[in-house]
Image (tube, rainbow, N blue to C red):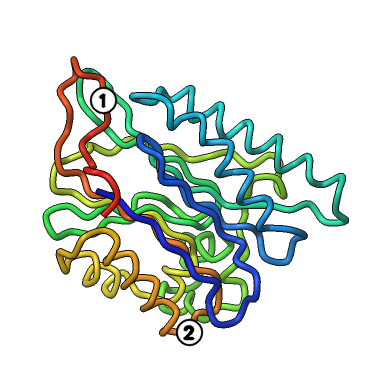
Amino acid sequence: MYAAGSHPGRVRTVNEDSSLVAPPVFLVADGMGGYARGDVASRLVAESFEPLAALSTVQPGDVEAAIAAAQRRVAALASEFTSAPGSTLVAAAYVLEDGRGYWLLANIGDSRVYSLADGVLEQISKDHSVIQELIDAGQISRDEALAHPERHVVTRAIGALTDSEADFSLVPAVPGSRLLLCSDGLHSELSDTAILHILSEGTAPDRTVATLVEAAVAAGGHDNVTVVVVDVVGVAPADENTLPSPGGPG
């Protein structure tokens, strides 16, 4: 089962986020604020991944090709605007490795993917941001990062920063686990503890998505908020070569 939801927030008039829920691929893209037409950039990123929806399972090369296509398409917008538009990317695609089902995760920028399994929430992706670099260097704490003036400055982006590379990771698609993809409009407003609480309530993905979005907007809504939740209810045997059974929207 899976669902997606988005809200422009309380401050911005344009929603520059895009999402894609097209098994076996799920995606969130956050158009770069401060650049021209970030909404167009994020939409092009999502569209670049749409061909993967026709596949029963995805190969790593398919994801790499989609990212390359997104880079080309968004970079080409630079000729239309004075500033190059840009977008973050976080994507999850179902793949088979040695007969086992996995999520192949890719991210560029500060949109995130979390995994919830056995009551434990884990942030799988690592932000490509000035704040993350300061945290890694021990110069600021995570609590201090929440109010830092550069908390929205990313160090990698599709289009705007053309040499940006994606980070990849492979996570088992475990029955009963839950995957969360989100733009920074969610995690900049809600703590991991708050996110864990909502994800653990046991409600269907559509209700969970709505609750997460509503909570982020109520907490301030300083940015666009986009959320995708995917529940793995079963994993197909290797010889079936099919998506783990998310059960459809709900």
Type of amino acid at the residue the image marks with label 2: Gly
Q: Which residue is pictured at 29% across the width and 69% down the height?
A: 195
136 relative to 151, above or below: above
Label 1 crowd bin: few (<14), some (14–19), many (20+), radius 10 Å: some
Q: Looking at the image, can residue 81 be seen?
A: yes
- The image shows a total of numbered marks equal to 2
Residue situated in front as seen by the camera: 115 or 77: 77
Query: x, y (%) of residue 204?
Result: 21, 60
Q: Which residue is pictured at 56% across the width and 71% down the height?
A: 151
N-terminal of the two: label 2 or label 1?
A: 2
Image quarter of residue 119? bottom left
**Quarter containing the C terminus:** bottom left
Residue carrying label 1: 242
111 relative to 246, above or below: below
Q: Which of the numbered marks, if any, corresponds to residue 73?
A: none
Q: Disc 2 versus disc 1: distance between alpha carbons?
A: 41 Å
What residue occupies the far front of the structure in this picture? 249
Residue 31 in the figure: left or right of residue 138:
right
Residue 233 in the figure: left or right of residue 25:
left
Discs 2, 1 touching: Cβ within 8 Å: no
48 relative to 136, above or below: above
Residue situated in front as seen by the camera: 36 or 206: 206
Type of amino acid at the residue the image marks with label 1: Thr
Q: Which residue is pictured at 70% across the width and 47% down the height?
A: 161
Residue situated in front as seen by the camera: 119 or 74: 74
Helix, strand or loop at label 1? It is loop
Query: x, y (%) of residue 68?
Result: 62, 31
Residue carrying label 2: 220
